[in-house]
Image (cartoon, grey):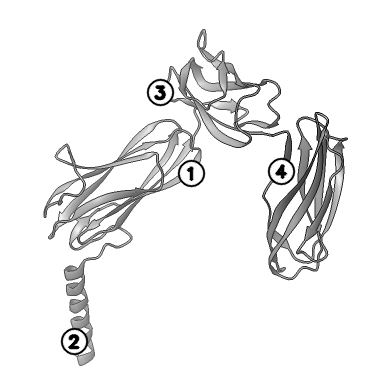
Amino acid sequence: MTMQHLFRVALAISSAFMLIQCGPASADGFAAKGLFFPQPRQELGTLISGEVRELAFDFEIRGSGVIPHRFQTSCGCLNVRFVIEGKAFPLHEELPEDARGQLLIEWKTAGFLGEKPSTVQILGEGPGLPQTLKFTGTLEPWFELQPPILNFGMVDGTKDEVRTVVARGPEAFRLLDIMAGMPPLEIRAVASAQAGLEQQFEVVLPKGLGEEGEHRGFLQIRSDHQYPLTLPIQYEIAGPLWLKPGRRLLLGAIPQDVVSKSVMEVGVGQGTLPKPEVHIEGIKGAEISVVTLEDLKHYQIQVVLPSDLAAGPVAGKIIVQLQHHDEGQVHSLERVVQVLGVVTAPK
């Protein structure tokens, strides 16, 4: 055996010894000492959105006990606990050497669609920590909704806004009652008189209720199947005078050597609004025009950026001068909107 061969053998033995002694957790859950998961990843395949799935990750404690302190999850839909011999093991206590058990993860899938990667990180003291478990599932709806997202758009709050939602299922079903609402929204005719492949109900945004601004949430209805119906909802309540967007106009990536255009809107829910005066500062060569959508009520502000902007971040501000006439009074207002974007050079 040559000296070079002997050196390679000694190096391999030394490396293996150091790994056994130190034993840090690797990406696939290996730990020579401490907390060890034989399979730290799971692919769950296709699930129905709305089901509650419990995942089990087997673990063992090798050579040295560890103390788990907390779980850091990628989603509030996850509940996590250690279980040994069928009993929950509390955090902040030592998992002793040679202990075996499972980390159980309860996953509430309601409200999610498509591929959903998730993680649970275990933080604490001892070898093998911190460590991250990963799992992925593709969530498909049991209910087909029309519309799939209920968007009221911008409303002024002067009248009830009523929208009809149609729910369809692969089997006959009944809708029973509200599991989770979104005040001040009201639901009409949610309880089904008889089972069917299709059910309808109305979602009402009552007049005069709700705060100004954008609102997002979801409505969840219990059915006579194991899966609830989950409907995402969004709307925006405009005040007497509104500007959209009201604070920042985000341009995103702006191609260089191309004239680009973005728009804003301004209007009033009550009273009248003469055509506003608008100008832009901070972006050389940018132009502003105001288009009337509804005379004395609603306008579109068009922002045109030149094609010769230098590559890199671009920032400026749009200043909107407004004269709001309401109940015999004139309110002079100024709104300043930041303009932010990044000019990208052609590849």
The mark nearer the N terminus, 4 or 3, is 3
Residue linked to disc 2: 6
Measuring from the top left, give residue 337's x and y in whole percent: 71, 52
The Cα–Cα distance between marks 2 and 3, rounded to whole angstroms, is 65 Å
Q: Is the Cβ of the residue at disc 1 closer than 8 Å to that at disc 3?
A: no
Which label was assigned to residue 115?
Answer: 1
Measuring from the top left, give residue 302's x and y in whole percent: 81, 50
Which label was assigned to residue 244?
Answer: 4
Measuring from the top left, give residue 19's x and y in whole percent: 21, 70
Which label was assigned to residue 226?
Answer: 3
Element class at badge 2: helix
Above or below 227: residue 55: below
Element class at badge 4: strand
Q: Could you tell me the amino acid type at mark 3?
A: Gln
Q: Residues within 10 Å of mark 2 (few under 14, many from 20)?
A: few
Q: Could you tell me the amino acid type at mark 4?
A: Lys
Q: Could you tell me the amino acid type at mark 2?
A: Leu
Q: Nearer the viewer, residue 49 or 343?
A: 343
Q: Could you tell me the amino acid type at mark 1?
A: Glu
Q: Nearer the viewer, residue 308 or 326?
A: 326
Q: Is the Cβ of the residue at disc 1 closer than 8 Å to that at disc 4?
A: no
Residue pictured at 29% horizontal, 56% vertical: 131
Element class at badge 1: strand
The Cα–Cα distance between marks 2 and 1, rounded to whole angstroms, is 51 Å
The Cα–Cα distance between marks 1 and 4, rounded to whole angstroms, is 32 Å
Say left or right for 20 vs 167. Answer: left
The mark nearer the N terminus, 1 or 3, is 1
Task: Residue 153: tell me if it is visible.
Answer: yes
